[in-house]
Image (cartoon, rainbow, N blue to C red):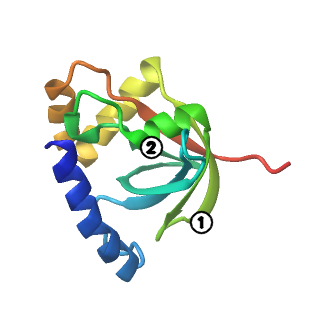
Amino acid sequence: MGPRLIRALTRLQNPIFTLMRGRMQRPPTLRLWTTGRKSGLERAVLLLYLDDGPRVVVVASYGGHSEHPEWWKNLLAEPNCRIWSAARGAEEMAASELEGEEREAVWERLTSMYSPYAGYQEKTSRRIPLVALSPRESD
């Protein structure tokens, strides 16, 4: 799945997600807002997520494309973000990449939830980042 097709599908999914208020999304879907690393503007994207206690985990797969998705590049520059899902509501979060054994254990759970992730990893030479979004501590 190329970047143009991914963008087209996202344009179709966004109004459906908004109309349904995120309900009846399987696998579970959230809206992630990041700050554009170049523009400084807020950017939003819909992503599948794995609920993992107080945090959620999202996958920077970009359909197995050779480049990282823009939202992940934005989070690398500014890890503070926000999410909204029907199950969790609105949350202020901070992003970090999962590594090592923890990554491997979560990867198994993610591919059980959404099997195409395994194919995306086979399709690309880059290691697909698993991104933990954890509740931000209040100041």
Residue sitting nearer the eye, 79 or 97: 79
Category of crowding for the residue at label 2, using alpha-carbon neighbours closer than 10 angstroms: few (below 14), some (14–19), many (at least 20): many
Report the residue at 61% width, 38% height from top: 79
Q: Secondary structure at mark 2?
A: helix
Report the residue at 45% width, 17% height from top: 100
- Which quadrant of the view contains residue 125? top left
In the rendered image, which quarter contains the N terminus? top left
Image coords of residue 8 (percent x, y): 21, 59
Q: Is residue 52 above or below residue 88?
A: above
**Labelled pair 2, 1 in contact (Cβ < 8 Å):** no
Image coords of residue 132 (percent x, y): 51, 38
Residue with the mark numbered 1: 90
Q: Which mark is residue 35?
A: none
Report the amino acid beneath label 1.
Ala
Residue with the mark numbered 2: 71
**Does residue 20 appear in the picture of this structure?**
no
